[in-house]
Amino acid sequence: FSEGALLCWSPGFCQEALRDENYEVSKAWYVPQLFSQALAEGLDVVIWHSLKENQLPLPPDGKQFGTGLLEFNQQPKFAYAAYKYASEQFTGATFLRAVPGYPNARIYEFSKSGAIFWIAWSLTEAEQVITLPSQPSSITKFFYPPFTPGLTATLDANPAYIVWNAPQP
């Protein structure tokens, strides 16, 4: 694993995709997936290309991949907020393991400042409920308000940050 990408390639498709809020939401969900997988593979750096979109319509050279964190006018996109949040969560975190036992989910475990956290998402289109090893102190999903955690978590394509303030038993 040396590179991850979520790109918009075709100029005609890109102009439509860049106006589609679902594409922007997908980019925001991709950010914690990219950060967690990069750390799990031992990468030292995650670089997002690019910071800012070109102005639409596409320039004559067609160089627009739809990857910008900011609009051409500097307004933040959803992915910018996701990138900022993920940067805060993963800075100083240590990768511990890929969590086994959840065949239709990708789950990575990290430690940070005495806490343990998982970043978890479904590998299928269907939501799935997973049983947690103990009750976490918080579960956060981007675009949703924090909710009271229990001993289960519902996973979908939107990665969940599951945090235990004390090490798990």
Image (cartoon, grey):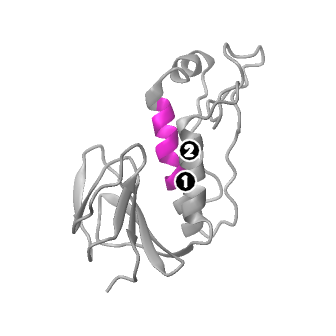
Q: Secondary structure at mark 1?
A: helix
Query: Residue 169's quadrant in the figure?
Result: bottom left
Q: Can residue 29 be found in the magenta stretch?
A: yes
Element at badge 2?
helix
Residue 94 percent across, percent down from the top left: 56, 75
Location of the N terminus (image quadrant)? bottom right
Closest to the observer, 74 or 123 = 74
Q: Residues within 10 Å of mark 1 (few under 14, many from 20)?
A: some
Residue 56 vs 70, above or below: the answer is above
Q: Relative to 41, is 150 on the left or the right?
A: left
Q: Are dots 2 and 1 in contact, CB under 8 Å? A: yes
> What residue appears at the point 21 percent right and 69 percent down from the top-left corner?
151
Mark number, residue 77: none
Quickly name the residue at label 2.
81
Amino acid at dot 1:
Tyr
User: What span is colored magenta in the figure?
Assistant: 23-34
Label 1 belongs to which residue? 85
